[in-house]
Every structure is written in structure tokens, then in C-alpha cells.
Amino acid sequence: MKRIIIIIVVVAIGGYFAYKGTIWPPLLAVVMTHLFIKFKMPQIEIIPEKKEGGIFSKIDSKGEIQGEFRAWRFLISNRKMPVWLEWLAQRDTAMSCTAKIEFSGSEKDFIMQGRWANSPQIPQIGKEDRVVRTLYPDPINIRSGQKETLDCIAQFPDDKIAYGWNNLVYFIDDWKVPAYSLKEGQYKVVVTATPLNGKEVSKEFRLTVDSDSLKTTIE
């Protein structure tokens, strides 16, 4: 509604100056309107949640804890509107945002569909929907000034390698997908987030996988 009101006001101002025989003010009004609409669009930012990862519990389908592992994730945020425009309007929500993660290096290259950490785990979904939800993970909405967590990799106790983490892991008993294995070494990780109503954003990071999970990092 605010956008419509602003456009009407701008058009009215432009019409007034056009009537007065001056062309520059209407052109300026059109440019300002375009810039304002652009400012309102979702502005996606991508950063690692923690360089050194964090400790998480492995929970089976019955809700019982089966041990712990270390995992690394990303924070995908939708930047707030600049302070000088906050009084006028809020940033648009990033609607139905999806993500993918590309790994390359150490003779290993693969792309996996991103999994939002707050989305339901596959075992919690009806069996008839599990395959579809794995191939097409749930999208998520990110409000202005808010952030959502995107899963990336996990490294289990006593393992010298790490594994990519998304919905596919729930079809594997030990949660280790062979196609997503990452042995010791350096990798380029490219995270891409795509809101339905905004610009696709990609950002590159460096992943170091170490035989000691305490030394595995994303930065």
C-alpha cells in the first residue's frame, strides 16, 4: 500500500512540473521511485555461523539421542532498510528462499541442495512426501532484519573426513552420504541463496577439512 501511495504522489508531482513546462523534476521523481523500489527488494547476506563449527546431538527417529557430532552452518540474512528510509517503509520479506552449496577442490566436486536448519527433518514427514522433499527442500521466508540457518557439513567423532549435510542424510543410517564425502584438504565452497522476489546471491568461502574436527574451519 505504501508503495502505491508513493508512486501516486511521485506521478502527481511529475504531472505538476510537466504542466509547468519543466522536464527535469519529473525525470528525477521517476529515478527516485525506481531507486526506492530497488531498496525495498530483499537484500541477502551470507556468512558462516561459526568458523570452527558447533556441537550438535544426533537424534534418531524415536527422538532419542545417539551421540554428538560437530557441524558447520551458514547464516542467511535479509538486511534491514537503511536507517534514512526506515521511517518510510520496511524491506520486503525474502519469499520462498532456496539455497544450494557447491564444493570443489581436492579432486572432489559436487553441488547439493541446501537444507534450512529450521525445516522439518525427513523422518518427521509422511513417507509419501519424503522423496519429493529431499529433491526439492522446503523453501523459507526471511523477514527484514532476520536470518535463517543453512546446514553445510558435519564431521563425526573419530572421523578424519567430513560430509555435506542436507535432507539426503536422513536416508543413510549413519548420516554419512558417500557422494558428499570431503577428505582432508582445502575446498572452495560457494553458497547461493535465491529468493522468489529478489536477486540471486552467491558468496565464496574456504573450507579446510582436518583429521581433527577441532581444526576443521569455514571462513
Image (cartoon, helix red, strand yellow):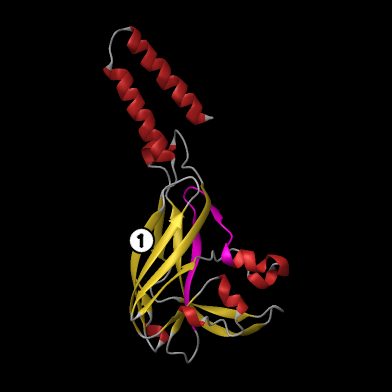
Quadrant of the frame with the C terminus? bottom left
Q: Indicate the position of residue 99 as horizontal and vertical percent values.
A: 48, 60
Quadrant of the frame with the N terminus? top right
Q: Is residue 113 left or right of residue 62?
A: left
Near-viewer residue (148 or 82): 148
Q: Indicate the position of residue 217 as horizontal and vertical percent values.
A: 37, 77
Q: Quadrant of residue 56?
A: bottom right
- Amino acid type, residue under disc 1 in the picture: Lys
Identify which residue is drawn at 29% across, 8% down: 21
Q: Which residues are magenta?
A: 135-155
Near-viewer residue (131 or 76): 131
Above or below: residue 137 compared with residue 179? above
How many residues crowd mark 1 within 10 Å: few (<14), some (14–19), many (20+)?
few
Identify which residue is drawn at 39% across, 89% down: 211
Q: Quadrant of residue 104?
A: bottom left
* Residue denoted by label 1: 203
Residue 142 forms part of the magenta stretch: yes
